[in-house]
Every structure is written in C-alpha cells, then in structure tokens.
Amino acid sequence: MESRKFFEESSRYIMNTYNRYSVVLRKGRGMKVWSPDGKEYLDFVGGIAVNILGHCHPRVVVAIQKQAQRLIHVSNYYHIDPQIKLAKLLVEHSFADKVFFCNSGTEANEAAIKLARKYSKEHIGPKCFEIITAKNSFHGRTLAALTATGQEKFHRGFEPLVPGFKHVPFNDIKSMNRAITENTCAVLLEPIQGEGGVRLPDQDYLKEIRALCNENNLLLILDEVQTGMGRTGKLFAYEHYDVIPDIMTLAKGLGNGVPIGAMLATDKVASAFQPGNHASTFGGNPLVCAAAVATIETLLEDGFILDQCNRMSKYFMKELEKLKEKFPRLIKELRGKGLMLAMEITTDGDSVVKACIEKGLLINCTAGNVLRFIPPLIVRRKDIDQLVNVLEGIFSKLD
Ligand SMILES: *Cc1c(COP(=O)(O)O)cnc(C)c1O
C-alpha cells in the first residue's frame, strides 16, 4: 500500500486526536525505525521516552515470546509469577514497599490520587482531600489526572473537572506554602517537568517540598512516568534531589514498549488500600510483566546502560552547546538531565521537526518551541553526531 493510502484510511477510520506526521512506521531495531517502503529513520523520540532499550530489544522480544506461549492473561484474582517478580525488583531498587500495577501513566496517577485521598481521610482528617500540583505540569488525560495537569489548554471543553485540585507555580516553594490549607492531603509533582518543556527544579526545591509536606502531614507523590527507569541517568529522578516520596508513579519506560504502569508506595500509605478499593483487569498481566522484568533486568545489569546514559548525556549536551554558539539567535536555551534533553528555540518547533523527518530523523517538539530529545538510553555518539549534523543543516537555512 502506498503511503497516501495509509494516510487516507488512517483519517477515515481513526478518531482525529493526534496531529500525525506523514510517516508510516512498520519495523524497528535499536535506534532505528523503517517505513513499509524501506525509508530509514533515526529515532530520538523513542515512543516518547518509552523505548529505553531501543526498539525490539532481543531480551525483551524473547521474554514476550516465551511468556506468550506460556500464559498471556489471567485475572488478578490469582497470583501471577512475573508480576511478583516485577514488584520485587521495583521494591528492591526504590524507596517503596508495595506496588499496584495498571496500564498507563494516567492510570498510575489516578491510583495515586485515590490512595492519597483514602490514606489522608483515614489517618489525617475526614476533610483531607485536596491535592496541590504545579502549573505547566502533565499528569495524563483521564479526568482526575487531567484536572491535576496544570495546563488550561488540556482542560478546555471537558468541564466540570474533578473537585479538589489546586495549581501553583513550579519551583516556587513560597506559593506552595501559601496554597496549603487544612483540606490539603498531598502534593503531586513531576521531579522534572516533561511535556511542559523539560523544566528542572532548583537543586533544593524538592527537598523543601518534602519538609513542607512533613510539617503539614501531607503525602508527597512524585510522577516519574517520564523521568523514571533511568531516563535522567539514575533509575529514578528523585535520587538526584535527595528526597524520598511517599508515592511514586511509573509507566513510559517500564516495559520498553508494552503498556504497563505502576503506582509504588511505602507500607504505611499502601495499607489504606484494601481488597475492593482499586483494581484493573489487565493491570500487571503475565505478558506485560514478563516484558518489564526483562527490561529492568537488562537496565540494571552491571549498571552499564545507566553509565552509557550519563556518558552520552554529557557528549550530547556538549555538542548541543556548540550548536548554540553557532546559532545564538535561533537557540534560546538548553536544558535537561540524562537523556531527557531539550533545546528551546526562538522559532516554531514543529517546522523543525518536519524538516528533520525529511532528513530521516525523528525528534519531538513540546510546549510549542521546545525541541525534546528522549532517545533510547543505548544511543551512541554517531547517532548524536547525525542528529547534530541534521539540525545544523536546518538551522543554517533558518538563520
Ligand atoms: C506521559 C505522561 C503521563 C501520562 O501517561 P499515559 O501513559 O499517556 O497515560 C503522566 N505523567 C507524565 C509525567 C507523563 O510524562
């Protein structure tokens, strides 16, 4: 089928919720993806921070194949061994004691919101339900997570929203302090804002938030859906900031591409959930858990991939700095940690993304003019060189 036919049928049969680029992708391996007619793309989007080990990583593929032959799905009424293995791995490598599995980032946040409300009503006070989040944040598209998301453009048309959410400027401890009332039960933050344009907090912000939470009996929920699973150079971003949350949510990188989310908590907080309080039919099923176990085991084995992520992060940033020196009018700022890097430009980002596609390079644009680079953590120097070359060519024409 020629490409035009794909685009026609896609818009005829699929709801119009994405501004899709004119690219069909059928095959992937490592850093590369291919269209049905064989056009090759170097992928610095990685399914939006999902494919941490690259496309079709052999260990993940084999784990899925083996599990598919053994058992794909059974109900959570029964014990599921890959789920137990995965929970144990997550607990052993994080602050958490218990895990709840679901299918996406937004669901992980819904679970966190429910757990925080229930815990606080039972342990702090019956009127404790309000959750404070940050402006410019992103927490997902289901109604409570959408309400938690501090960006009006995502809310428009979907009112009435869920009661009990308040937004304050990110990285502003005074505003957070002022927003706390006797009804507040939790603070929900991304350690580094992703969709909002890769915004980093000051080094002490999260520590100060933790102290504020302790003083006021609030739970600290960290949304690590994007920053988790090695993306920032540590397994979880909270490790950079010397804080321990009460609840953490994960999804994107957790299964290297299979749909899985998780909500992790300390024993004390997790005990507020009892049988019947929360559930998910597919959550943590054998197939996705086997993929996630293979993903984490590969990621953690001898720390090689995290080292690689940190080395490539330094190299990447250095190369982007050189580009910034060449194009000071076009490039406003470089930001990021690990392999969650961003270049804020002074022109429309989408046209740069389209020009990159023409040159066989996939990059992402968020918040209008922020080019975001969230490649697989296995990215190599020559891939980064190729990206920088392509950008240099495009910027030369724009400058
Ligand atoms: C992507 C994202 C979500 C939503 O995840 P979905 O799997 O799309 O529901 C939530 N929080 C953060 C920080 C994200 O980056």
Image: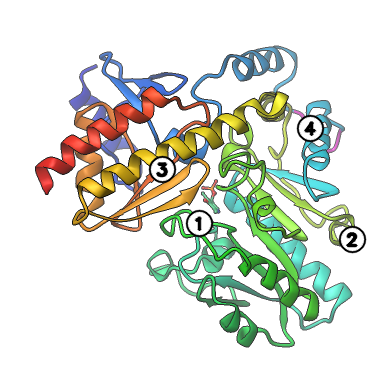
How far across and down, in percent of the image, does residue 191 sit?
A: 59, 58
Mark in the foreground, 3 or 4: 3
Marks counted in the figure total 4
Name which residue type carries label 3: Met
Residue stretch in magenta: 74-78
Q: Which mark is residue 83?
A: 4
Residue kind at label 2, given as amino acid type: Lys
Seen from the viewer's position, the closer of residues 122 and 317 is 317
For mark 2, what is the residue?
Answer: 268
Which residue is labeled 3 in the image?
317
Q: Earlier in the sequence, mark 3 or mark 4?
A: 4
Could you give the CA–CA distance between mark 2 and mark 4, rounded to whole angstroms? 21 Å
Residue mark closest to the camera, 2 vs 3: 3
Identify the mark nearer the N-term, 2 or 3: 2
Alpha carbon of mark 3 to alpha carbon of mark 4: how far? 37 Å
Q: Is residue 22 visible?
A: no
Q: Quadrant where the N terminus lies?
A: top left
Q: Where does residue 180 sit, x and y in percent of width and height?
A: 67, 84
Left or right of 287, for residue 168? left
What's under tag 4, amino acid-wise? Gln
Q: Residue 293: name its quadrant.
A: top right
| Residue named by callout 1 | 141
The answer to whether residue 178 is above or below residue 27 is: below
